[in-house]
Amino acid sequence: MTSEQQPTPGQRVERLRRAAGLSRERLAGLCGLSPTTVKFIENGRRSLTLRAAQQLAPHLGVRDLGDLFGPEVALSLDGRASHPAVNDVRRALTAWHITIDGEPESTDYLRGAVDSAWQTWHTSRHQRTAAGEILPGLLDATQRATRLHNGDDRRASLTLLAQAYHLAQAYLAWHGDREMVWLTVDRGMTAALDADDPLAIAQASWYAAHLLRAVGRGDEALDRLRQARGLIEPRVADGGTEWAEMLADLHLCAALTRARTGDQGAWSDWDAARTVVDRALPDGFVGLRTRVSRPLVDVYAVMCAVDLGDPDEAQRRAHALDPASIPSTERRGRHFVELARSADLEGAREATLHLLGRAEATSPETVRYSPVAQDMVTRLCREAPAAIRAEAVDLARRIGATDL
């Protein structure tokens, strides 16, 4: 067989899946992808990324990724863009303070610093660059505080340290350093447990669930979320808005986790989140760090519909949602990427390119570092009609797409 006759990576996935006696739905559930994603990989409408290949391989009996990509495909470990501040954040995460002295920052100061960092993340158009500048100092200050404070101040410092680790996880998630992401999850959970703060533990569980889902451990993610809801639900009726905010966020995370595995039960969790927001949070409420709000609930509805492979439902859900109402520049950029994914599902390349352009205009780094956005832009450069191909290539150059 000549190189021109070699099966595509998608065809290899399909052959191996059939040989293993797996349906698309079953394979998707095992590896943490949606059935639509598996379908589109097989029929060539979506590229087989290295990350997806790593998720699929164990369930297809593959030990050498060459069995999926073929002998003619070279895999580069440097193909995914990495932010220039990653090394500074890595050093801050692994700068163990063996000895420590001096006076710690006050918990009030640290709370303001953490809140300001999250506000910057949600309002900056270049949130990863801004976070990369903030994180090393924030991690150092909160780490020092937990060592130097005692009693209630130490517990408060541990809760704030957990939040600093969560921001580090958000920053690192798209930069290809999975070991560091696992470190932030573990450290964040440890700090929250040491603080013995139910809200902090639930928040750490939310972040852990996102990583577990991303590596194909969706069932574990849902279990962690159920446990976290058990901490929060009894306190919602008599607690402040932060308890209802956390409960809604846990339901939204569960909804997305189910949708990523093709489980229509996602809508039950999404509806539970909407009920909590409508009944327990005041009009106009926006969570400072989570951005939980009525518009965010609608954003998740679009995401769930896309992951469930239903572009018509995604467009219906998006129809009444004004992107300007989304209370986070980063989430607004990701919303445009989700709408682009919906258009991509339907093969509407002009609309896909238009929406990716809006995402880039809203939050350039969301497109530059998002694997799914990079994949769509790369495919548009190869497959788009000639009338828009030059525009696609120009967008690819602006966001640093390397796989051209």
Image (cartoon, rainbow, N blue to C red):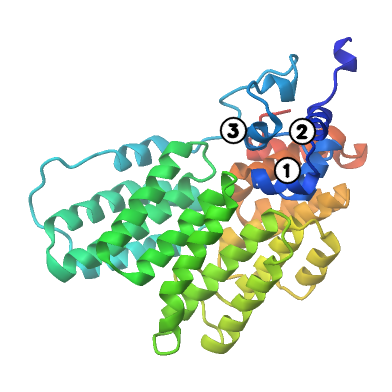
Secondary structure under the numbered disc 1 in the rendered image: helix
Q: Which residue is mark 3?
A: 80
Q: Residue 20's mark? A: 2
Q: Please give left or right for residue 218 compared with residue 377 in the image.
A: left
Residue at 57% x, 62% y is 329
Nearer to us: label 1 or label 3: 1
Q: Residue 66's mark? A: none
Tally the numbered discs.
3
Secondary structure under the numbered disc 3 in the rendered image: loop
Residue at 68% x, 54% y is 260
Q: Which residue is mark 1?
A: 27
C-alpha distance separating marks 1 and 3: 26 Å
Q: Please give left or right for residue 367 compared with residue 341 in the image.
A: left
Pointers 1 and 3 in contact (C-beta within 8 Å)? no
**Crowd band around label 3 with a 10 angstrom C-alpha radius: few (<14), some (14–19), many (20+):** some
Secondary structure under the numbered disc 2 in the rendered image: loop
Q: Which label's residue is closer to the chain start, 2 or 3?
A: 2
Quadrant assignment for the N terminus = top right
Q: As drawn, which residue projects farthest toward the front?
A: 21
Q: Which label's residue is closer to the chain start, 1 or 2?
A: 2
Q: Which label's residue is closer to the chain start, 1 or 3?
A: 1
Pointers 1 and 2 in contact (C-beta within 8 Å)? yes
Residue 168's place in the image compared with 119, above or below, is above
**Kind of residue at badge 1:** Leu
C-alpha distance separating marks 1 and 2: 10 Å
**Crowd band around label 1 with a 10 angstrom C-alpha radius: few (<14), some (14–19), many (20+):** many
Residue at 17% x, 61% y is 105
Nearer to us: label 2 or label 3: 2
